Amino acid sequence: MTATTTADLLDYEEALERFDPVLGLEVHVELNTATKMFCGCPTEFGGAPNTHTCPVCLGLPGSLPAVNGKAVESAIRIGLALGCEIVDWCRFARKNYFYPDMPKNFQISQYDEPIAINGSVDVEVEGKTFTIAIERAHMEEDTGKSTHVGTTGRIHGADYSTVDYNRAGIPLIEIVTKPVEGTGALAPQVARAYVGYLRDLLRALGVSDVRMEQGSLRCDANVSLRPHGREQYGLRTETKNVNSLRSIERAMRYEIRRQAAVLGSGGKVTQETRHWHEDTGITTSGRSKEEAEDYRYFPEPDLVPVAPAREWVEELRGTLPEPPAVRQKRLSDAWGFSEMEFRDILGAGALHLVEATVAAGTTPAIARKWWLGEMARRANETGAEIESLPITPSQVAEIQALVDAGKLNDKLAREVFDGVLAGEGTPEEVVAARGLAIVSDDGALGAAVDRAIESNPDVAEKIRGGKVAAAGALIGAVMKEMRGQADAGRVRELILEKLGVA
């Protein structure tokens, strides 16, 4: 199938002049339970392929599932945090379809009787508040992971495929919105802000590590267009398994432009799943989108219904963390940032990183400087999310502690960041291995100062004549000779001492 190119797209502003986007977001959250949803296999990420499996999660004949109680507890807490109603009674269903990563040829999920319904959350984008209505949050199990080996990375054109069933059966909560209307040109940013809100909320709840790059939080992004003034929704596409906030925004913007071009030329949008390609920034066709009846749902005969006691639900309500808006207001007040400065932190998805770095010993201003400056730049260069960078808040705080102790300056600190991000070890190990510590020994500094004075007699004479500001040129010469590792303050003191300037 020929992929859509940028030449086939309508300009974004023109698309929004002609059509209203309607969004639907399905967010899948892998829970951090110790064992899988219906068996006792471990859930750790990164095990050797097909080592975290058993007859139950492989769907072998005669095996019987049993519900993970901790997963039910997490589902209830997620539902409560989303403002949902927790139902008195729900049950599991079999969602039937064939695909190699689903060893049973069906997925145990919830269909018309989910555990949580009718919630809502508010997100803010460019000073505007959008209410996102939640239709449901339901429990299910994850599938395995297929890897298609070949030049395309997709099943079409692959040389061969492998399947790892370690992920099959890991507890999932799927959070499904009602149609999101009225976002206009901000639709892609609203989608990104909503998923970012969920990520922060789920992290605060402690129910998932929400590592999008590892697939423990991923989004199926639905979008359709309709002409202005029309009430009926257009046919939608569903871009599957988008696994970064940046990609959600880019994929939604692309689909709006692509669908607008199709409709604008008199064509019809195909209701289908689509795949997002991070490298090329496009979506491509997957398969025709099934309706619910195509999955032949029926109640799971091997599992009893789940009926959470009201007392238990209220007890779990008492374990919820402070709401995100309250937390943000508390941190904003405590840190003393302007509204714009704090909004930049939220927009970068760095709130928890800055908070953890402050907790590790830095000032809020320093934490913000490193994360929104140095780290955000590196993330943008690689197209990664800032939280996926291989550096921790405690390591950022450790590097700043070396600066505060006079062992590094900001220039050298950036080189230490390079080493840590490259996997060369802890900040102290990088400093030692790369020889980055600041030189403050008067012997070495004094010799370098003497050479700078000797090489720049005219500058030295100006300093002796009272133009102390000219010392900057000599300081620069010393810093260049010592590869930026001299203590600049001590170098200045030595220059003035040697030239007899008080």
Image (cartoon, grey):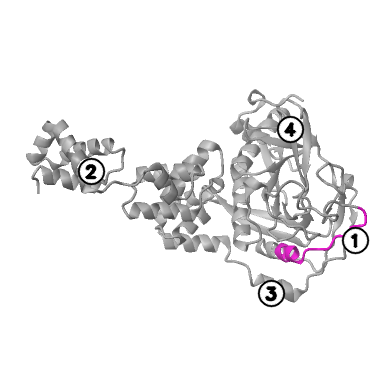
- Identify residue for label 2: 444
Q: Which disc number belongs to residue 160?
A: none
- Identify residue for label 4: 149
**Residue range of the region highlighted in magenta in the rendering:** 61-76
Q: Earlier in the sequence, mark 4 or mark 3?
A: 4
What amino acid is at disc 1?
A: Asp
Q: Are marks 4 and 1 in contact (CB under 8 Å)?
A: no
Name the image quarter holding residue 339: bottom left
In reply to whether residue 63 is colored magenta, the answer given is yes
Q: In which quadrant is the N terminus drawn?
A: top right
- Choose mark 2 or mark 3, whichever is in front: 2
- Where does residue 196 sit, x and y in percent of width and height? 60, 51
Q: CA distance from mark 2 to mark 3?
A: 66 Å
308 in relation to 339, above or below: below
Q: Are marks 4 and 3 in contact (CB under 8 Å)?
A: no
Q: Are marks 1 and 3 in contact (CB under 8 Å)?
A: no
Q: CA distance from mark 1 to mark 2?
A: 78 Å
- Where does residue 43 sit, x and y in percent of width and height? 72, 56
What amino acid is at disc 2?
A: Ala
- Identify residue for label 1: 302
96 in relation to 56, above or below: above
Q: CA distance from mark 4 to mark 1?
A: 36 Å
